[in-house]
Amino acid sequence: MPQHSPDYSKSAGPWVRIETFGFEHGVPRTVTGCLLVDLRGGGLNDPADRPELTDRDGKDPGVVQHVMASRMTFTRIEQIVGQAKALLDFNASKNFVLRVLVGDDTGRTKAVVVGDAVAEILTARGITTEVEHHHLGSTTT
């Protein structure tokens, strides 16, 4: 008997909470039940490698374009979306809100771009999603 996915679009609250962060600041505190994504490696273009993007963050169109131009970006985003959907389907009967923690070195660039892209895709698929960028306003010391 095949299992059917619940209709996530009928929820009043979010099913997924995406939190971006910088590993240099520490992983956000979590009790249990989250998907941790580490973008410190993995073949995504790093805006820190381009002097004109150094002081910009993941909301800047130039940074977004640079990160999204990476060969592996769309593959990585689809992997995260697939993992999130699988965890949601498995835990939906428990009214489980899935936390997806997306981290890079500082939490200001790649994590923000990827976190926003994942949220956009999940929302487009009818899964209510919210995003919090923990270190978007932080500066590296």
Image: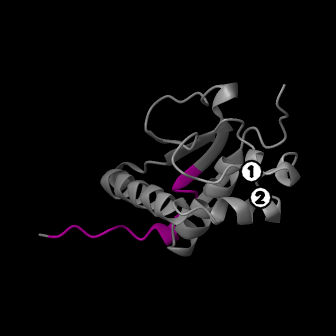
In which quadrant of the rendered view does residue 114 lie?
bottom right
Residue 78: x %, y % from top left: 46, 63
- In the rendered view, does 124 fall on the left or right side of 62? left
Report the front residue among 68 and 9.
68
- In the displayed structure, would residue 99 be above or below residue 141? below
The residues colored magenta run: 2-17
Report the front residue among 47 and 113.
47
Q: Distance between the residues labelled 2 and 1?
A: 6 Å
Residue 30: x %, y % from top left: 53, 30
- In the rendered view, does 81 fall on the left or right side of 13? left
Density class for disc 1 (Cα within 10 Å; few <14, some 14-19, many ≥20) is many
Residue 7: x %, y % from top left: 42, 71
Cβ atoms at labels 2 and 1 below 8 Å apart:
yes
| Mark closer to the chain start, 2 or 1 | 1
* Figure colour scheme: one colour
On the question of residue 29 being in view, the answer is yes
Give me the residue at 70% from left, 40% from top: 107
Identify which amino acid the numbered label 1 is placed on: Pro
On the image, numbered disc 1 is attached to which residue?
47
Secondary element at tag 2: helix
* Predominant SS of the magenta segment: loop
Residue 133: x %, y % from top left: 72, 45
Residue farthest along the left direction in this orientation: 1
Secondary element at tag 1: helix
Mark linked to residue 37: none
Mark linked to residue 63: 2
Magenta region includes residue 16? yes
- In the rendered view, does 125 fall on the left or right side of 90? right
Give me the residue at 54% from left, 63% from top: 71
Identify which amino acid the numbered label 2 is placed on: Val
